Amino acid sequence: MLLAIRRTFLAGLLAASLLVAGGCATGYGTDLTPELESAGLSKEQIANRNARVVDNNLRSIWDDLARAMLLDRTSTLQPALIP
């Protein structure tokens, strides 16, 4: 009785290991979309997005610096505008 249980367990273990090791493998490979870097974007799209973000951040930094140094608008201390 114990020997039959061991044989059944070992047969099940062998079958499971064969399935995991490649019994159900397909010819597609693991990477079905090698041109995509993430779930929905290619490397070029990610590079373009990153370039836009960096450009926008740099523009914001320059705007903030101009505002902090009071260079963003003319002085309102004089009533007449100086050309």
Image (tube, rainbow, N blue to C red):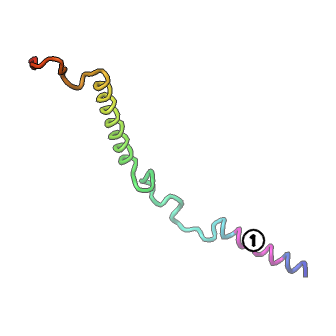
Q: In this view of the protein, which residue sits in the foreground, 45 or 61?
A: 61
Q: Is residue 14 left or right of residue 46?
A: right
Q: What type of secondary structure mainly makes up the magenta span?
A: helix
Is residue 15 rendered magenta in the image?
yes
Q: In this view of the protein, which residue sits in the foreground, 22 or 33?
A: 33
Where residue 33 sits, quadrant-wise, is bottom left
At x 69%, y 69%, the residue is: 18
Residue 5 x/y as whole percent: 85, 78
At x 11%, y 19%, the residue is: 79
Q: In this view of the protein, which residue sits in the foreground, 41 or 4?
A: 41
Local SS, label 1: helix
Q: Which residue is mark 1?
A: 14
Q: Quadrant of the C terminus?
A: top left
Is residue 10 rendered magenta in the image?
yes
Q: Does 41 sit above or below residue 47?
A: below
At x 35%, y 40%, the residue is: 53
Q: Amino acid at mark 1?
A: Leu
Over which residues does the magenta segment extend? 7-17
Residue 48 x/y as whole percent: 34, 43
Where residue 65 sits, quadrant-wise, is top left
Q: Does 31 sit above or below residue 23?
A: above
Q: Quadrant of the N terminus?
A: bottom right
Where residue 52 sits, quadrant-wise, is top left
Residue 22 x/y as whole percent: 63, 66
Residue 46 x/y as whole percent: 39, 46
Other residues around mark 1 within 10 Å, as few (<14) / some (14–19) / many (≥20): few
Q: Is residue 63 left or right of residue 11?
A: left
At x 23%, y 26%, the residue is: 72
Count the labels in the image: 1
